[in-house]
Amino acid sequence: MSDRLGKTKPSRRELIILLLFLSLAGYVYVGFYFPDPEALARFKPFYVGLISWGARILVPLSVLGILRLYRSVKKGKLSPGQAMLPFAGIILGLFLVYPFVTYFYEKALRGPVKLQEYHPYFQLNPPRLPDSYRTAAPGRSVLMCLGGSTTQFKDPAGRDWPSRVEAALRRRYENEKIDVLNMGMMWYTSLHSLMNYAVNLRSVRPRAVLVMHAINDLLQNADFSYFSRGPFREDYGHFYGPLKNLVSRRSLPETILEMLGDFWYAKPRQVIDQTDFPGLVPFKRNINSLIDLAETDGTRVVLMTQPYLLKDQFTAEEKAAFHMVNTEAIGKGKRWSVATAVRGMKAYNDALREIARQRDIALIDLEPRIPKTLEFFSDEVHYRQKTFDIIGFYVAEELIRLNIFDAEASRPAPSFGKSSQDREDQGGKSEA
């Protein structure tokens, strides 16, 4: 009897191993209670709960299971080889299941790569012109709206603000054949719109071009974010944007390890309170270049400031709705403060106001027209249903006030304002 009891007692070496094992298990277990809240915002709540609570449940159960196996070996109920069978079974099972899990991950979780949606120069394919507008359309008054998702996106009923502008203008000018084309595309910056106008849209020679850019150009300044690869470049070459989905695609094991880094003993991010935005230099240059091109063809340019929810004083509910500062202007170790985003949006809108004043360009100052509350915004810049109506009505009224469709103003003479080159030739410094 005493011999049997003696065999069940752990040796000093086994005690040391057990203590090290329990310490390691405790360290792993506690780590899942210190996740990175900003990183978790990138995942759906279901997956956050699955990983967090799955780890908190599985780690203690695994520890209890291993201790029970050890106790069975010490009592002679199992041989060491038999005790290793469950671990061998788990490893074999993982090898057998891995191909199926990878397939599910690719198809259901990560999704297939739709290469036809991407463009080697524009990142995303620019919106296509209707076939009837491949060249100039005599007898029709064409307006083009350039911008990002705040121009492209539609309300739940499938109507965007350019279509509302079109309807209002057609009611006002019954004898004019007016078409307002939405050429906005999510992620697009002033550089994308400049390229798209020069390559795809200029041949139409529209009556006017409406340009609204701010937030996507502003995000280029967050060169520490997950969308960037390297320091800021004036040609925006550092910013991968939607191409991040192609460039940074990871295998299932790499994704799991990356996610564990967000869920397990995550370090708090450094909050960046940025006051200088180097992206304003190319932003002004892009807008001025677009104006130069349009005016060469006798096309009027109308600049629009961009409405936004960001403000100095905000509620917890409003902060939770912010998308750029919660998920986009974030990298592995840094994130923008809300104050930085507020400061940046004001700077970019002010740049548009400055260009309009210096170039004698029409400006629709839309930003102060939309109240900064969740009643009108779903995040920093995207609209609620009623906001589309406000924008459509106000932009149409401003276009009427600007005499865009009056006979004398229907086709202004080329270069009716001072180009950026003109100002340089006169001894002034280019705004770019």
Image (spheres, rainbow, N blue to C red):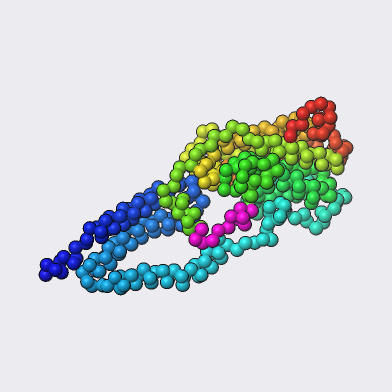
Image height check: is 353 above or below 321? above
Rendering coords of residue 387 (x, y %):
62, 43
Side of 315 relative to 386 (left or right): left
**Nearer to us in this view, 420 or 247:** 247
* Residue 161 in view in this figure: no
**Nearer to us in this view, 390 or 269:** 269
Q: Residue at x 67, y 58 (%)?
A: 117
- The stretch of residues the image draws in magenta is 243-254
Image height check: is 376 above or below 245? above
Residue 130 placement: quadrant = bottom right
Rendering coords of residue 220 (x, y %):
63, 42
Residue 430 placement: quadrant = top right
The quadrant of the picture occupied by the N terminus is bottom left
Q: Is residue 120 magenta?
A: no
Q: Which residue is drawn at 64% across and 49% down?
A: 240
Side of 325 relative to 417 (left or right): left
The quadrant of the picture occupied by the C terminus is top right
Image height check: is 171 above or below 343? below
Q: Residue at x 43, y 57 (%)?
A: 51
- Residue lying furthest front in this view? 13
Which SS does the magenta portion mostly show? Answer: helix
Q: Which residue is drawn at 61% across and 47% down?
A: 229
Rendering coords of residue 183 (x, y %):
73, 49
* Residue 60 in view in this figure: yes
Q: How many marks?
A: 0
Residue 218 placement: quadrant = top right
Rendering coords of residue 412 (x, y %):
86, 38
Q: Is residue 245 magenta?
A: yes
- Residue lying furthest top in this view? 427
